Image: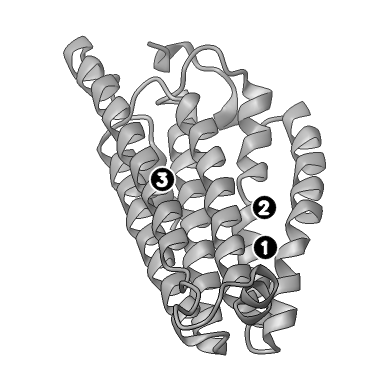
Amino acid sequence: MKKMVSKILGRGRLPSAGAMQREKRELRRLESLTDGVFALVIVLVTLDLPPPAKDTAFNLANFLASRFQELLLAALAIVVSLVYWFQSNLLLGNLARTDGKHAVLSVFQVFLLLLYLLAVSLGIQVGNEPLVLATQSAAAALLGFVAAAAWWYATHGRRLLTDEIDDGEIAALRLRVLAEPITATLTLALAFVGPLAWELGWLAYPLVALVLRRLGMDYAQDPPPDQVSDPSVQK
């Protein structure tokens, strides 16, 4: 197992100047793809909301009361998508380039984001079914863990990073990026307790993020050996 992890995370040879230029351009395209899909997800979640009935006079209070669950699901989906979007911008913004393995992980994130959109759309249509809510949580958790895996891969030996980010910040982010998927995993179990418990479970995110941020600050004081700058892997 240790050899397998070492093979996946191993530094390997430094790519040629031409390959590095191509990988820089690929990173820009990857950022554009990710931004486009996140924006599309937010738009489609909004468009999925059921319109008010046409055969009666529109009343905002009645509309909000009758569509409360659908509106709440959509609001949660938009918040989760925005949190992951901001996280994606933060992590990709610290990269100088991408490579094949990192690109595969990033594209898999896009697939999981679309799966999350499908689960949210289904939830808006059929209501608070436990299995549908659990699917939303599972998709969000997988999305976050894959994002964390991509960050760990990119930071190992500083293989894909810019020179501006320091080792302490790298180490701290390794923990901070786990806040979203850990929260989603907690809500996965709560989906079978009840819709209210599932919805309230997402409120644990600020607390989880705070704890991991504090742990990350301590972790940054003494980063692991593979996190320390190595001149042999610098651009």
- For the residue labelled by badge 2, is the local secondary structure a helix, a strand or a loop? helix
Q: For residue 101, what is the image quadrant?
A: top left
User: Which mark is on residue 183?
Assistant: 1
Pinpoint residue 8: horizontal percent, then vertical percent. Answer: 36, 45
Label 2 sits on what residue type?
Ala
Do the CB atoms of the residues marked 1 and 2 lie less than 8 Å apart? yes
Q: What element carries label 3?
A: helix
Task: Specify the farthest residue to the left.
Answer: 18
Front tag of 1 and 3: 3
Element assignment for label 1: helix
**What colour scheme has been applied to the protein in the rendered image?**
one colour
Q: Residue at x 68, y 30 (%)?
A: 223
> What residue is disc 3 on?
39
Residue 208, by quadrant, is bottom right
Q: How crowded is mark 3: few (under 14 residues within 10 Å), some or many (20 or more)?
A: some
Q: How crowded is mark 1: few (under 14 residues within 10 Å), some or many (20 or more)?
A: many
From the viewer's perspective, tell me whether residue 220 is left or right of residue 100: right
Determine which quarter of the picture holds residue 102. top left
Q: Mark 2 points at which residue?
A: 179
Query: Residue at 22% of width from left, 10% of height from top?
Result: 17
Q: Where is residue 14 in the image (x, y as percent from the top left)?
A: 29, 19
